[in-house]
Amino acid sequence: MSGGLGYDVAMIAFLRGIVAEALPPQIVLDVHGVGYEVTVPLSTYDALAPQIGKELSLKTHMYIRDNIQMLYGFATDAERDIFLLLIERVSGIGPTTAMSILGSVNVEQFKAAVVQGDVRSIARAKGVGKKTAERIILELKDKIGLAATWEQQERGDTSREAGDAELALVALGFKQVEARKAIAACIKENPLSHTDELIRAALRKLN
């Protein structure tokens, strides 16, 4: 999938394997004899409670910049989408800061903090000060517009499926207005679509 984020290399979208090593925030998964070292948010690590010898599945994103190659893992698509949103769409936010934020607040808490302008909740993350938290909220509200969708989700005016699909598309680099229009068209065609179905259908309309 491509939405302007430069996805021109082979990406690892998910991994399922046996836990070979586990020392927060890293998990090493043995996938058919190949060990993948994956960095996960601390909250995700605690929630997953990885046990050596047990099978584990992770949503993943391979971060490649210059000489840096890191594989980041998440328990859910929504976690990964927030991570991508932060590193690709908010100025000055890198993977370390994004992982720190996800390690201190879950997806729903992050959405609520942005909607409510709750600087303190985001600023609690290690390495994130008040100014950075303010910039995150400002950019997500004004430049991207996702906060309005999240607020509608809280009120029940927008379904969770539609909101999560919009987040995924915006995280991939599509404009929020275009993403919302495509999703609305998909819902009109199939009102009972799940999030994954909405994303796939919308991508066909956007590409």
Image (cartoon, rainbow, N blue to C red):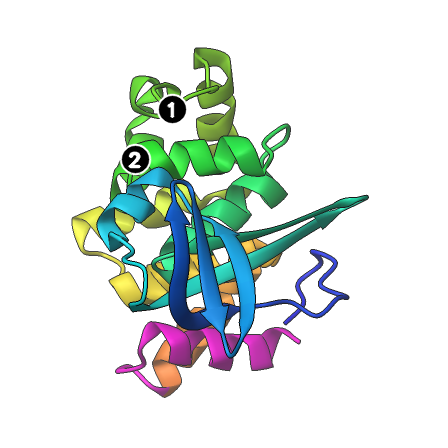
Q: Is residue 175 left or right of residue 42?
A: right
How dense is the environment of label 2, judged by Cα within 10 Å: few (below 14), some, or many (20 and up)? some
Residues 86 and 101: in front is 101
Q: Check if mark 1's residue and mark 2's residue have beta carbons within 8 Å.
A: yes
Q: Which residues are magenta?
A: 190-207
- Magenta segment's dominant SS is helix
Residue annotated with mark 1? 125
Q: Residue at x 31, y 17 (%)?
A: 120
Is 29 magenta? The answer is no
Q: Is residue 178 left or right of residue 67?
A: left
Q: Is residue 35 left or right of residue 52?
A: right
Task: Inspect the image, locate mark 1, and give the three-letter code of the amino acid beneath it.
Answer: Ala
Residue 97, percent from left and from top = 51, 30
Residue 178, percent from left and from top = 56, 62
Does residue 180 appear anywhere in the picture? Answer: no
Numbered disc 2: secondary structure: loop
Residues 52 and 92: in front is 52
- Dividing the picture into quadrants, the one containing residue 206 is bottom right
Task: Inspect the image, locate mark 2, and give the three-letter code of the amino acid beneath it.
Answer: Val
Residues 103 and 207: in front is 103
Residue 19, percent from left and from top = 38, 63
Residue 55, percent from left and from top = 32, 71
Classify 136 as above or below 84.
above
Residue annotated with mark 2? 105
Q: Is residue 194 left or right of residue 93?
A: left
Disc number placed over residue 106 in the picture, else none: none
Numbered disc 1: secondary structure: loop
